[in-house]
Image (tube, rainbow, N blue to C red):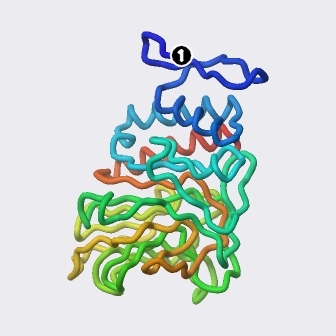
């Protein structure tokens, strides 16, 4: 039901009578979760609506292309792009484990999500993109290095965020940005469970790796190549020209894809996510 204020009253099952007003974007997401047989608590819905309000106020929401909480407790509900259900929804492959509240756990072997997001058609520029996720539990002991995101056509045409490296003694992240085969930003320290790990590229010579708001590395060189991958991002692994390689066994949520952000936009997003995490108890 649309009210003159532009807000909606949540209408759910009889066991959950409407008690709050939400933005049109939030309500559309909640309705999509319900259609997908998912369940969201009122605490979650209040917190998510507040996150969108904060994002609008702080300026990061307008640059976000997709945001996937991985919530609702069913595979279909966890696949939803909360900003525009039905567009850029994920398609999970081989049944990863869906948390009853929020998050998806991959097995590190054959489970992943096809994001429906192809960098060459979604991003406007090779040197302006921001991707990341909240890693609830970081990956361990998978068969090979684990990627939270990955899209690669050839060695000089790829965007990949590796959440751990088996060649190291601890979990170290690496971003491979579109450019030379070895064009990357690599951390020398580990992140912690519950951190947002993100690749934030804001210029051809400025690609940063973050753990929450801690900058773990920054590549300030300009790569030779400037093409965006022409295959979809995989979530929980790397899409290598249509084949899954280097999957992760992490548990994660809140996948985001953005462009046009400043560093301030990113750090404001992390701060607002902290409020959201606290509200829902993760």
Viewer-closest of 188 and 21: 21
> Tag count in the figure?
1
Q: Quadrant of residue 209?
A: bottom left
Indicate whether 221 appears above or below 144.
above
Q: From the top left corner, tell me how far across and down residue 168 is, in percent.
A: 58, 86
Position of residue 136 in the picture relative to residue 89 (left or right): right
The 10 Å Cα crowd at callout 1, few under 14, some 14 to 19, many 20 or more, is: few
State the residue lying farthest toward the right: 15
Position of residue 273 in the picture relative to residue 281 (left or right): left
Q: From the top left corner, tell me how far across and down residue 21 is, in percent.
A: 56, 19
Q: Quadrant of residue 20?
A: top right
Which residue is painted at 45% across and 80% down in the image? 240
Mark 1 element type: loop
Q: From the top left corner, tell me how far across and down residue 183 is, in percent.
A: 33, 81
Viewer-closest of 114 and 190: 114
Indicate whether 72 appears above or below 42.
below
Which residue is painted at 23% across and 69% down in the image? 204
Viewer-closest of 186 and 224: 224
State the residue lying farthest toward the top: 4
Which residue is painted at 60% across and 54% down in the image? 253
Which residue is painted at 67% across and 53% down in the image? 75
Residue with the mark numbered 1: 1
Q: From the top left corner, tell me how far across and down residue 97 is, in percent.
A: 73, 61
Viewer-closest of 123 and 174: 123
């Amino acid at each position: 039901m649309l009210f003159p204020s532009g807000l909606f009253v949540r209408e759910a099952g009889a066991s959950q009578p409407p008690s709050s007003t939400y933005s049109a974007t939030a309500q559309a997401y909640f309705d999509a979760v319900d259609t997908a047989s998912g369940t969201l608590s009122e605490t979650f819905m209040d917190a998510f609506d507040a996150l969108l309000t904060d994002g609008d106020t702080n300026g990061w929401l307008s640059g976000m292309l997709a945001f996937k909480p991985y919530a609702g407790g069913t595979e279909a509900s966890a696949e939803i792009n909360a900003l525009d259900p039905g567009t850029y929804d994920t398609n999970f492959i081989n049944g990863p484990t869906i948390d009853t509240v929020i998050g998806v756990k991959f097995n590190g072997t054959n489970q992943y999500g096809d994001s429906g997001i192809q960098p060459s058609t979604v991003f406007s520029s090779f040197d302006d993109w921001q991707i990341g996720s909240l890693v609830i539990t970081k990956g361990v002991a998978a068969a090979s290095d684990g990627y939270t995101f990955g899209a690669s056509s050839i060695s000089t045409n790829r965007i990949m965020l590796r959440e751990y490296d088996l060649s190291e003694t601890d979990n170290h992240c690496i971003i491979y940005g579109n450019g030379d085969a070895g064009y990357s930003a690599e951390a020398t320290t580990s992140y912690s469970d519950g951190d947002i790990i993100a690749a934030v590229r804001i210029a051809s010579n400025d690609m940063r790796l973050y753990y929450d708001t801690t900058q773990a590395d920054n590549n300030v060189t300009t790569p030779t190549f400037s093409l965006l991958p022409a295959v979809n991002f995989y979530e929980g692994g790397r899409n290598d020209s249509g084949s899954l390689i280097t999957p992760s066994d992490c548990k994660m949520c809140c996948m985001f894809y953005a462009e046009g952000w400043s560093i301030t936009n990113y750090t404001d997003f992390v701060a607002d996510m902290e409020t959201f995490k606290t509200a829902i108890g993760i």
